[in-house]
Amino acid sequence: MKRVIHGLLALALLLLSGCAWFETRQEKTATQLAADGMTAYERGKYRDAIESFEKLRDWYPFSKYAALAELKTADSYFHLGEYDEAMYAYETFERLHPRNEAVPYVIYQIGRCHFDRMESVDRDQTATRKALEAFNRLKQSHPDSPYAEKADAHIQECYRNLAGHEFYVGMFYFKSKHYKTAISRFQSVLDDYPDVGELSWKARRYIAMARERMGEATE
């Protein structure tokens, strides 16, 4: 008997919770959820914004605001510094809406997710390379977009970082007297990353020094 009573109580609770869910869903229209999300976003309350946008996407997947919700969810994660989540959201948006007018911005933001995680020249440069790849893809696919122009400064910064890394590794080999390998690294600075200013003439200088020391070692 007790089992029957418990079963009836559980069923009643399930039905009540189900009714509450439907009521909650009906309380907010897609327009209201979009407005709530944008208000929270503009106030910097990105967690609240994500919550509203996710409800909008889940409850009204065919709403005219669904794409907006997807994009602003990605932006919210970006502003929170949660770059993996932001990249996933941006990449999903691009895959689902390849012809949307926001795609150039989305590609730019994918690049920014990598760019903002770039390491110093003595560390791994995977993020730098991925940022450069995204920015170059943007310039190739949407050359007339203002975001392509905006990416130029970031591209130069990526080149400086990568050139700095090559020079740093070259100096390691130079100091350890592996001059041939050092020359290869310094030459990479000149060949792969032109116009990096002071680093270019430093690379030339150390190439000359390494060759000189190789000659002395041969003698």
Image (cartoon, rainbow, N blue to C red):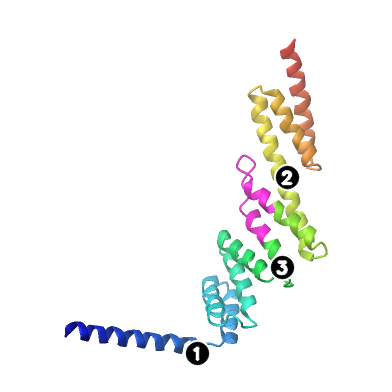
Q: Give the magenta-colored segment's residue range.
A: 110-131
Q: CA distance from mark 1 to mark 2?
A: 54 Å
Three-letter residue code for mark 1 = Gln
Q: Residues within 10 Å of mark 1 (few under 14, many from 20)?
A: few
The numbered mark, 1 or 3, whose residue comes first in the sequence reads 1
Residue assigned mark 1:
26
The numbered mark, 1 or 2, whose residue comes first in the sequence reads 1
- State which quadrant residue 147 falls in: bottom right
Q: Is residue 164 above or below residue 54?
A: above
Residue 117 magenta: yes
Residue assigned mark 2:
160
Q: CA distance from mark 3 to mark 2?
A: 27 Å
Place of residue 121 in the rendered image (x, y in percent of width and height, measured from the top left): 65, 41
The numbered mark, 3 or 2, whose residue comes first in the sequence reads 3
Q: Is residue 141 above or below residue 174?
A: below
Q: Residues within 10 Å of mark 2 (few under 14, many from 20)?
A: many
